[in-house]
Amino acid sequence: MNIAEQIYETVKTLPEQTACEVLSFAESLKAKQVDEDRLRREKALATLAKYRGRYKAEKFQREDRFGH
């Protein structure tokens, strides 16, 4: 039995109001995760933007570059 099934089995026996609280808590955790993912992405993009234009991409053959 996976974790979602275990949660379901536990929650289905709870009173309606308590089950609503569990649902509300799970939704708040999900929203928090979305926010954390968004902030992590924004931070990564800001880091990339900081170095934009500093490096010139050059094609090379590995053999030519390292003398092999």
Image (cartoon, helix red, strand yellow):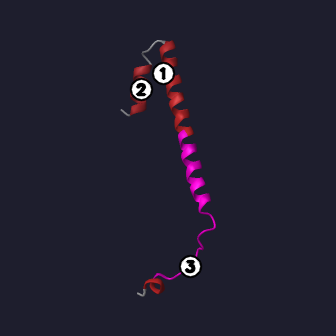
| Residue neighbourhood size for the residue with mark 3, other residues' Cα within 10 Å, grouped as few (<14), some (14–19), many (≥20) | few
Residue drawn at the location 48% of the way across and 18% of the way down:
19
Disc 2 marks which residue?
7
Secondary structure at badge 2 equals: helix
Mark nearest the camera among 3 and 1 is: 3
The residue type indicated by label 1 comes to Val
Pointer 3 and pointer 1: residues touching (CB < 8 Å)? no
Q: Is residue 18 above or below residue 25?
A: above
Q: Which residues are magenta?
A: 36-62
> What is the C-alpha distance between the residues marked 3 and 1?
55 Å
The residue type indicated by label 3 comes to Lys
Q: Nearer the viewer, residue 45 or 31?
A: 45
N-term-proximal mark, 2 vs 3: 2
Residue 63 highlighted magenta (yes or no) = no
Disc 1 marks which residue?
22
| Residue neighbourhood size for the residue with mark 1, other residues' Cα within 10 Å, grouped as few (<14), some (14–19), many (≥20) | some
Where is residue 16 shown, x and y percent of the image? 50, 13
N-term-proximal mark, 3 vs 1: 1
Q: Which disc is residue 51 wearing?
A: none
Mark nearest the camera among 2 and 3 is: 3
Residue drawn at the location 53% of the way across and 34% of the way down:
32
Disc 3 marks which residue?
59
Q: Is residue 12 above or below residue 2?
A: above
Q: How many marks?
A: 3
Q: Nearer the viewer, residue 40 or 13?
A: 40
The residue type indicated by label 2 comes to Ile
